[in-house]
Amino acid sequence: MIDPAAPVNTKWLPSHKLANGEQGFLLRSLPLAEIQPRLSVKSGFICYIPAQFERCYIDLAMTFEEYSNTFSAKSRSTIRRKIRKFNEFCNQNMHFEVYKNADEMQTFYQLARTLSEKTYQEKLLDAGLPDSEAFRQEMKEKAQQGQVRGYLLLNDKKPVAYMYCPIFDGVVLYQHLGFDPDYKKLSVGTILHWLVFENLFQESKFRFFDFTEGSSDHKQMYSTGRILCGNIFILENAFSMRFWIRCHMLVEDFSLGLGKLFDALGLKAKIKRFIRYGSG
């Protein structure tokens, strides 16, 4: 979780030595004041930052009207048209449901879990709504504390898109999302996002919506601000460690170069679509 209102901590090196058996530390999504060297040595530690990225967020202090006005008139019209088209497809039985307390979250989980099994996030990325007792217990505890929200978009009684968001210190986290691939042409993911944000502004309880790691097109489109962050490895300064870091850098550079080549050939978007939806 990030806090856009907090000052950036520029002193992120550990204040203590590595214990026996420890080889380093990982600081994940740490806010950065500026772009850092990919590889450097500081205070006797190797500082390796394989990823530096903008983490998107929405400032929930404004009103929904103010937020919607950050979009162009054309974009707002397009979103309203998508909602209207989907409602017509549902024979005016489109439903958007919000789940908060423990009983409601149990209902949400049962519906969203079945939907998650259909999604590419679960089938290909192992990133669906977790099917474990530990997750269900954590969800129940958060619900009892008012620290979680579940959202569903439904065609009558059939769930077609879900979003699961835990809450920490007034920051709503974008943790699990999925939609029925049979409804991809109806933009149910876009519709769900818009309705979720409208509801969060109406609640007026939270400070920020944190899109977490990654800066995809839809996150940039919906966000009102961005913070530079990095995944920082602070490692013991040893020859073997430097060797494996260099190997990792070579693999990362090769992967990045291949991605740029596919993008230049117009293949990257096609591959992404195939991974998500198959040949159909």
Image: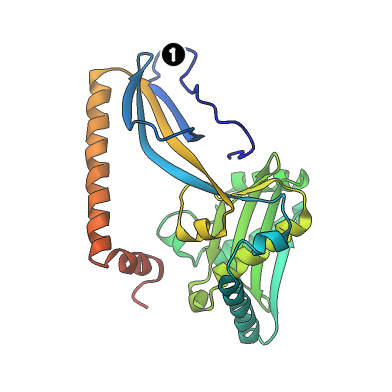
Q: Quadrant for residue 171, please give it.
A: top right
Nearest the viewer among 77 and 201 is: 77
Q: Quadrant for residue 266, please give it.
A: bottom left
Q: Where in the figure is residue 152, as x and y percent of width and height? A: 65, 66
Q: Tell me, yes or no, if residue 87 can be seen here.
A: yes
**Callout 1: few (<14), some (14-19), or many (20+) C-alpha neighbours within 10 Å?**
few
Query: Horizontally, is 197 left or right of 104 in the view?
Result: left
Which residue is labeled 1 in the image? 19
Residue 41 vertical position relative to residue 61 in the rendered view, above or below: above
The residue sitting at 54% across, 27% down in the picture is: 9
Q: Quadrant for residue 106, please give it.
A: bottom right
Nearest the viewer among 86 and 99 is: 86
Q: Where in the figure is residue 38, as x and y percent of width and height? A: 33, 33
Give the residue type that dot 1 points to.
Ala
The residue sitting at 77% across, 55% down in the picture is: 203
Q: Where in the figure is residue 165, as x and y percent of width and height? A: 63, 52
Residue 144 vertical position relative to residue 217 in the rendered view, above or below: above
Q: Where in the figure is residue 23, as x and y percent of width and height? A: 37, 21
Residue 5 vertical position relative to residue 44 in the rendered view, above or below: below
Q: Tell me, yes or no, if residue 104 can be seen here.
A: no
Q: If the image is split into quadrants, where does the C terminus sit?
A: bottom left
The residue sitting at 43% across, 44% down in the picture is: 53
Nearest the viewer among 129 and 65 is: 65
Nearest the viewer among 250 and 115 is: 250
Quick one: SS at disc 1? loop
Q: If the image is split into quadrants, where does the N terminus sit?
A: top right
The residue sitting at 23% across, 32% down in the picture is: 246
